[in-house]
Image (spheres, grey):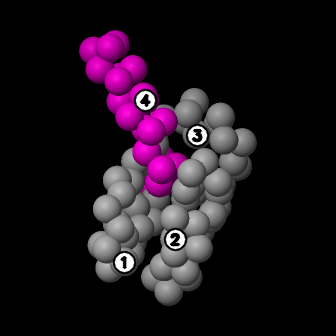
Amino acid sequence: MFFRKKEENNENKNTRIKVLGSGCSKCNELEKNTKEVLKDLNIDEEVAHIKDFKEIMKYGVMTTPVLLVDEKILVSGRVPNIKELKELIQENI
């Protein structure tokens, strides 16, 4: 079990797009919307959903959900609408 968790953390480090959040409804909505936008834009990227508070704290964010692309915070503390999310992803991928 220990090794599996370590491998998952390594996979998350290699993922360009991350959602940080405990798994609440807003965090899940941001993950779902991000995946939809990626599909609409024909971008083949995985989305990691990091729920571990220790990992989240490493990013220095105080409110979730958070959307990261290439370790850059694009959104924090809210779920943007689809149009804004699409623009943010297009500008940062």
How packed is label 3: few (under 14 Cα within 10 Å), some, or many (20 or more)?
some
42 lies above or below 50: below
Identify the element where label 2 is drawn. Answer: helix
As shown in the figure, which amino acid type bears the numbered disc 4? Asn
63 lies above or below 74: above
Per the rendering, the mark at residue 58 is none
Q: N-terminal of the two: label 3 or label 2?
A: 3
Q: Which residues are magenta?
A: 1-24
Taking the view exactly as shown, the residue that stands out farthest to the bottom is: 83
As shown in the figure, which amino acid type bears the numbered disc 1? Leu
Mark 4 → mark 2, Cα distance in angstroms: 23 Å
**Front disc: 3 or 2:** 2
41 lies above or below 20: below
As shown in the figure, which amino acid type bears the numbered disc 2? Ile
Which residue bears the numbered disc 1?
A: 41
30 lies above or below 82: above
Mark 3 → mark 2, Cα distance in angstroms: 21 Å
Per the rendering, the mark at residue 89 is 2
How packed is label 4: few (under 14 Cα within 10 Å), some, or many (20 or more)?
some
As shown in the figure, which amino acid type bears the numbered disc 3? Ile
Q: N-terminal of the two: label 4 or label 2?
A: 4
82 and 42: which is toward the camera: 42
Per the rendering, the mark at residue 9 is 4
91 and 75: which is toward the camera: 91
Q: Looking at the rendering, which quadrant does residue 12 occupy?
A: top left
What residue appears at the point 57 percent right and 30 percent down from the top-left corner?
Answer: 54
The verdict on residue 76 being magenta is no
Q: Are marks 1 and 2 in contact (CB under 8 Å)?
A: yes
The verdict on residue 13 being magenta is yes
Per the rendering, the mark at residue 56 is 3
Mark 3 → mark 1, Cα distance in angstroms: 27 Å
**Front disc: 3 or 1:** 1
